[in-house]
Amino acid sequence: MDPVCRGKARWRSCNRHEWGRVTSSAATASSPGTRLAPCGPGEDGMHLRYALLALLADGEAHGYQLLKSFNQRVGPFWHPNIGQVYQILHDLEHRGLIVRRDVTVGTRVRRLFKITARGGRALRTWVERRPAWPPPLRDEIFVRCLAVERHGCGALTTQLAKQEAEYRRYLALVQDQEPTTDSSVTRRLTHAAALAYTEAHLKWLDHARRLLEERRARLAS
């Protein structure tokens, strides 16, 4: 079994409280327009482990360097915080996938991390695995529709309109984050994905509105 995936259930169970604490503090400290997606536990944490291994495969680095590089190369669509980064680095070190050395810089001690041969094998094993399916449909709009469905088509239409307004606001933010000419390929891909994802949701909202209009017409006839 992949060393990173071993004990996955234990990681989720034992760290649920810590993840929640780190995520909430990060949300409080964030500034407007810098994050276009929430950060949290679960699959995102697992994928972030491989992201850190991939970045360390490029060379030795400390936590803040890794976070900066990740944000530059992926963009604002997945914004981990430094607490997450160091928590995962500690776990990777414990598993023998990376090693650490401490370097004194002035009055500070900086922790530098380097990928091990075992970590390189774990990264290659993960890359060669079959990719995951799309994430489950757990969007808030479905719960909102469930909550107001008993009030009729008008209430559902109102919720769809509110959701569309938020998606269009998000789309404007994404468009403002246009990659530059020197952006990484991954940065360009994530930006294109964010645009396509949001536009697909807007298309679904339009389809949902038409379904409701047809239902209203049937009930009226």
Image (cartoon, rainbow, N blue to C red):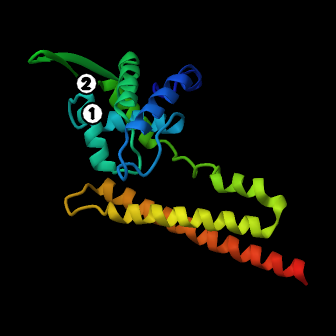
* Residue appearing at x 39%, y 16% in the figure: 94
* Residue appearing at x 41%, y 51% in the figure: 77
Can you give x and y, in whole percent of width and height, for residue 196 in the image?
A: 47, 66
Can you give x and y, in whole percent of width and height, for residue 26 in the image?
A: 41, 35
At label 2, the amino acid type is: Phe
How many marks can you see? Answer: 2
Question: Looking at the image, do the residues carrying marks 1 and 2 touch, with CB atoms under 8 Å apart?
Answer: yes
Can you give x and y, in whole percent of width and height, for residue 186 in the image?
A: 33, 54
Instruction: Give the position of the C terminus as an image quadrant.
Output: bottom right
Query: Which secondary structure, mark 1?
Result: helix
At label 1, the amino acid type is: Leu
Among the 4 quarters of the image, the one containing residue 27 = top left
* Residue appearing at x 88%, y 81% in the figure: 220
Furthest residue to the left?
106
Looking at the image, tell me whether mark 1 or mark 2 is earlier in sequence order.
1
* Residue appearing at x 35%, y 25% in the figure: 86
Residue marked by disc 1: 56
Residue marked by disc 2: 113
Q: Nearer the viewer, residue 96 or 191?
A: 191
- In the displayed structure, would residue 76 be above or below residue 123? below
Among the 4 quarters of the image, the one containing residue 164 = bottom right
- In the displayed structure, would residue 125 be above or below residue 118? below
Q: Nearer the viewer, residue 10 or 108?
A: 108
Q: Nearer the viewer, residue 56 or 166?
A: 166
Can you give x and y, in whole percent of width and height, for residue 169 in the image?
A: 47, 64
- In the displayed structure, would residue 3 be above or below residue 168? above
